[in-house]
Image: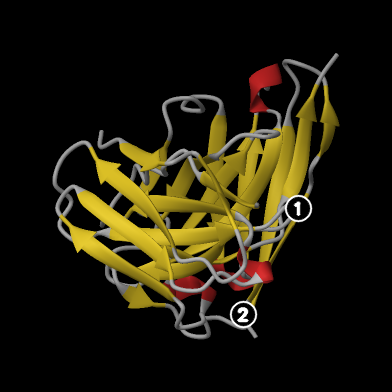
Amino acid sequence: EVQLVESGGGLVKPGGSLRLSCAAAGLTFSGHSMNWVRQAPGKGLEWVSSISSRSVYIYYADSVKGRFTISRDNAKNSLYLQMNSLRVEDTAVYYCARAYGDFNWFDPWGQGTLVTVSS
Amino acid sequence: DIQLTQSPSFLSASVGDRVTITCRASQGISSYLAWYQQKPGKAPKLLIYAASTLQSGVPSRFSGSGSGTEFTLTISSLQSEDFATYYCQHLNSYPPYTFGQGTKLEIK
């Protein structure tokens, strides 16, 4: 069974840092681009960042560019999101998701990890 | 960047009803659209990709259609487990991957 499991969320003060992890199982992790998507409380889905299978191509949403860094370790079947200079508006559930198929539909998704930025 | 607008934002319906949700793109995107279902406290689940291809394991009462700028998700006969929020997403070979704002389907 293909499974993605996020971890690393928690409560952090504005300006602080946090590192999220996403562990993959049941798939050829090194063969797929991976993504982070977030969802603020009561709001819709927002794509955050993407990384290609061998980390050659990396993209960020404008809202996190310069503050967040996506990375992966194919030997460990793991995806990461280093979040620095966190803001209250970064409060959200963060999901990792595999990009699949010719045009990168997202499947599957992890269960999500909650990041709360508050003083 | 392409914008996706879903309508309606809220929809109230009864078990057995046929419902349709629309997603409009700000410019033509061929058939590069996916639909997701999200239940409270859960991760989104892929229902349809390439506008009309049903993901494996998804019930056949779900269907998608459209191309260019207008797309629809139809549930032919609502079941109790279908009450959820639905999102469309622009598919592409590279980001950004835009989502619609969501349609919350509630029990009447």
Name which residue lies at 32% across and 58% down. Answer: B72
Pointer 1: residues within 10 angstroms few (<14), some, or many (20+)?
Answer: few
Q: Nearer the viewer, mark 1 or mark 2?
A: 1
* Position of B76 relative to A43 (above/below): below
Look at the numbered disc 2 and give the secondary structure of its residue.
Answer: loop
Name which residue lies at 62% across and 56% down. Answer: B84
State which quadrant residue A2 falls in.
bottom right
* Position of A68 relative to A85 (above/below): below
Observer-nearest of B8 and A21:
B8
Relative side of B107 to B85, left or right: right
State which quadrant residue A69 falls in.
top right
Pointer 2: residues within 10 angstroms few (<14), some, or many (20+)?
Answer: few
Residue B53: x and y in percent read 32, 76
Relative side of A15 to A81, left or right: right
Observer-nearest of B8 and A49:
B8
* Position of B52 relative to B107 (above/below): below
Q: How is the image coloured?
A: secondary structure
Relative side of A74 to A65, left or right: right
Observer-nearest of B14 and A89:
B14
Q: Which residue is mark 2?
A: A2
Look at the numbered disc 1 and give the secondary structure of its residue.
Answer: loop
Q: Which residue is mark 1?
A: B41
Q: Kindly identify the amino acid type of the residue bearing the numbered disc 2.
A: Val
* Residue A22 visible in the current orientation: yes
Residue B2: x and y in percent read 25, 37
Q: How many marks?
A: 2
Q: Is the C-beta separation of discs 1 and 2 under 8 Å?
A: no
Name which residue lies at 47% across and 69% down. Answer: B47
Name which residue lies at 60% across and 41% down. Answer: A38
Q: Quadrant of the N terminus of chain A?
A: bottom right
Residue A119: x and y in percent read 85, 13
